[in-house]
Structure formats: structure tokens, C-alpha cells
Amino acid sequence: MYEEKANLDADFLRKVGPVLRSMGFANEREALKEQALLLILSKINRYRAECSYYEKKYGMTFEKFAAMVNENGGEDFEHEDDLLDWRFAKETLEDLMRQKKEIEDA
């Protein structure tokens, strides 16, 4: 991706620059940063909603649910599946939040 940026030729930048400025961006970097943030925010909302779904479904936090499932020894396949899905959503959300912070600070 970084190589592709280096390959943006002057003609392309000359054509895109005025369009981006007319939309309120100071430069190409600002526009790219804003787009990346929008994409990440979209995914954050998706995984936040999924975590919220499981919290409402079970009436507890992920940590409490994981402890409950572990105490039961894996006897409930629905709980096991939900635990895996919830863990994935939670970990992905945490990663996305870190990425968002990195981009905001860039």
C-alpha cells in the first residue's frame, strides 16, 4: 500500500486535489485519514452491537459468561458457540479501537 502511494502520479493528484479541497479536506493525507477512520468506525459499530447483543442475551459481561461456561465444562454447545463468537467480537473490537487511536494520533 505504501508503494502504491508513492506511485500516485502528479496528474492524478492534480485532478483529485481540487475535488478533495472542495469537500473540505486540506490535502490528500487528511482525506485518507478521514476515510480510514470512517471504515474503522463502521466496523467498531458492528462489533460493539454484537457484544451488546450477547450482553443482553445473557444479562452479564463477557468475563462472567466465560467463567460460567468454563464452570459447566463445555456441556452446552450453544453457550460454547456463543462464547467463541462473543470472544471474537470482543477481541476484534479491542483491536479496532487501538487502530482507531493510532490513526487519530497519526
Image (cartoon, rainbow, N blue to C red):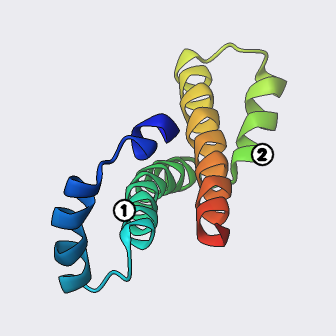
Residue 68's x, y, as percent?
77, 35
The relative height of residue 41 versus residue 21 in the rendered view (above or below) is: above
Q: Residue at x 41, y 69 (%)?
A: 34
Residue 5's x, y, as percent?
42, 46
Choose between 20 and 35: the one closer to the eye.
20
The reply, left or right, for residue 16 in relation to residue 77 is left
Choose between 95 and 3: the one closer to the eye.
3
* Mark toward the start of the polypeptide (1 vs 2): 1
Q: Residue at x 43, y 59 (%)?
A: 45
Q: Residue at x 63, y 45 (%)?
A: 90
Return the mark for residue 73.
none
Residue 7's x, y, as percent?
37, 40
Kind of element beneath mark 2 = helix
Q: Residue at x 36, y 62 (%)?
A: 35
Q: Residue farthest to the front?
A: 10
Residue 101's x, y, as percent?
65, 65
Choose between 62 and 93: the one closer to the eye.
93
| Real-space Cα separation, disc 1 to disc 2, in angstroms | 33 Å
Q: Where's the C terminus, which quadrant?
A: bottom right
Residue matched to label 1: 35
Kind of element beneath mark 1 = helix
The reply, left or right, for residue 43 in relation to residue 24 is right
The relative height of residue 49 versus residue 83 in the rendered view (above or below) is: below
Return the mark for residue 63.
2
The reply, left or right, for residue 50 in relation to residue 106 is left
Q: Amino acid at mark 1?
A: Gln
Q: Are marks 1 and 2 in contact (CB under 8 Å)?
A: no
Q: Amino acid at mark 2?
A: Glu
Dividing the picture into quarters, in which one does residue 86 lie? top right
Choose between 48 and 92: the one closer to the eye.
92
